Image (cartoon, grey):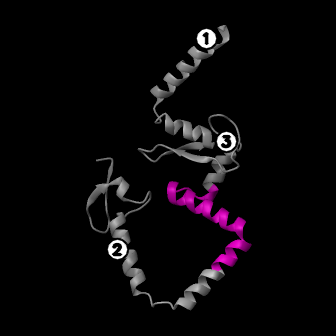
Amino acid sequence: MSGHRTCKVCGEIKPKNQFAPQGYQCRQCRTKRQRAYYAALPPKTAEERKKAVETTRRWRERNLEVVREKSRIAHIKRKFGLSAEEYDRMLQEQNGVCAICGMKCKTGFNLAVDHNHDTGKIRGLLCKNCNTALGLLKENPENMLKAIEYLRQHSESDRVS
């Protein structure tokens, strides 16, 4: 049952999609625990809540770059289990370019972490276009070879005309 995990809270065996990527508990158990935690907290007044929201909003506006970087680091850690240092090391090993096309990401974003969707193993860093292409070809080498052959056939006929 490679597509399943056992929840450490309820002990049930459930499909992997019922867990967070690095989670040890199923989404149902996590939701129950979070609701119980927040229900036990003392209630805030509407004025306290409003003040806290406004303080956070002002801080985020003043520190937009910090917020973006922290968000990027948290996303990479949450989704792939990579620290910022590990990501930066991979980026440096690839000379800051896509592992397939050798270009910097044209969108201005960081390179995407490419991984095997079945095993979760990280393969490298790709630009948005190459990462999307792999996904659209269903990460299937046969589909990729067929696409290459298709392009070769049509590029030769394009030259003749």
Residue type highlighted by circle 1: Ser
Residue at screen point 61% across, 87% down? 51
Query: How many labels sit on residues?
Result: 3
Residue holding disc 1:
157
Circle 3 residue = 94
Q: Nearer the viewer, mark 2 or mark 1?
A: 1
Question: Which residue is found at the position 39% from the left and 84% from the top?
Answer: 39
Q: Earlier in the sequence, mark 2 or mark 1?
A: 2
In space, the residues marked 2 and 3 are separated at their CA atoms by 43 Å
Kindly identify which residue carries mark 2: 32
* Callout 2 amino acid: Lys
Q: Which residues lie in the magenta part? A: 56-85
Question: Could you tell me residue 31's position as x and y percent?
Answer: 37, 71
Kind of residue sitting beneath label 3: Gln
Query: In this view, which residue lies farthest toward the left?
Result: 12
Residue 102, image quadrant: top right
Asked which secondary structure carries label 1, the reply is helix
Note whether 16 is above or below 145 in the view shown.
below
* SS at badge 2: helix
Q: Are marks 1 and 3 in contact (CB under 8 Å)?
A: no
